[in-house]
Amino acid sequence: MDIKKAVPTAAKKPVVKPVAKKTPVKKMSEAQRIKNLLSLNSSTRIDLGCGENKMPGAIGVDFRKVNGVDIVQNLSLYPWSNIPDKCADVVITSHLLEHINPASSNPQLTELIKLLVAKKIITDKEVDSTIGDHEFLGGFIRFCDEVWRITKPGGQFISTFPYAGSPGYWQDPTHVNPISHVTMAYMDPLAKDQAGNLYHLYSIYRPKPWKILRYFYDQSGFAEIAMERREIDKSYNCSSENGMSK
């Protein structure tokens, strides 16, 4: 009986399939996210200083990342780097303006920053990203100029706040900016009093121009004002971006 020896066969090498390279997912920048957010609706409303009580349908802005806040931005640092120009049809503030420091920039701080930049201890880029505008005339005026910047031509700025000197104004220890029915006339080059006479207050500081549409107030309670962005006219003699010069 013939017994055939089994001839060993060479072991087959396993077929290794090439691993498909994963395409890295490009993370969306914060600027692009905000741009997309602002383009979602045909009419854009921005609620500044909204906290957790954002107006329904609005884009919420606050320095704290809490529920309802869509854009984190410190509104006391100028300019508001996270909010682009002419992006809002309506800007809303509710019980925010009385918290805005009305003081002008600190001249000692301004000179110190200039000295540090001159000695190349810090750079202009670092100043812009951490401090921002450090030379301006009137913090509240600077704030309103920023609202003007982010508002579309013909857009509105609507605000509610406690009237200057009212119990609602004095009760909060963080209220620093009293606003009366005349205060906003400093922002409107053509503002008139109840008798129809021009106030002639705009020319004192010459900020970015607004048009007062309506103003309701109770001297012992609260006030609400609606203003429309005016376009700059040579006759207004507007100041520069920071209000320090023509």
Image (cartoon, grey):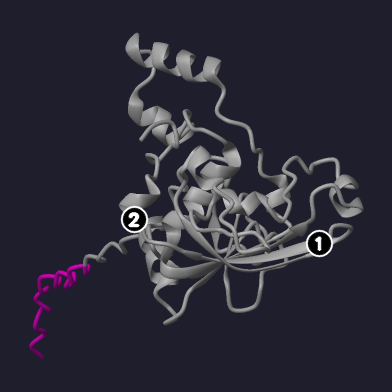
194 or 172: which is nearer to us? 194
Q: Is residue 95 left or right of residue 148?
A: right
Name the element at disc 1: strand
Q: CA distance from mark 1 to mark 2?
A: 32 Å
Rendered location of residue 56, percent (x, y) = 65, 78
According to the image, label 1 marks what residue? 222
Q: Residues within 10 Å of mark 1 (few under 14, many from 20)?
A: some
**Circle 2 residues within 10 Å: few <14, some 14–19, many ≥20:** few
Q: Identify the residue position indicated by label 2 in the image.
A: 233
Q: Residue at x 22, y 65 (%)?
A: 21
User: Which one is in front in this view, the residue at disc 1 or the one at disc 2?
Assistant: 2
Quadrant of the snapshot with the C terminus: top left
Looking at numbered disc 2 in the image, what kind of residue is underneath it?
A: Asp
Based on the displayed image, in which of its 4 quarters is residue 213 positioned?
bottom right
Q: Residue at x 49, y 32 (%)?
A: 136
The answer to whether residue 58 is magenta is no
Q: Is residue 24 above or below residue 123?
A: below
Task: Give me the residue at 9% from left, 76% from top.
Answer: 7
- Residue 2 placement (x, y as % from top left): 7, 88
Image location of residue 95, percent across then percent down: 74, 57
Question: Is tag 1's residue or tag 2's residue first in the polypeptide sequence?
Answer: 1
Instruction: Check residue 19 for magenta coloring.
Output: yes
Main SS of the magenta part reads: loop
Q: Position of residue 170 (x, y in %)?
A: 88, 45
Res. 60 mark: none
Query: In this rendering, does residue 29 appear at all?
Result: no
Q: Nearer the viewer, residue 60 or 141?
A: 141
In the image, the segment drawn in magenta is 1-20
Q: Is residue 9 visible?
A: yes
Q: Is residue 197 left or right of residue 33?
A: right
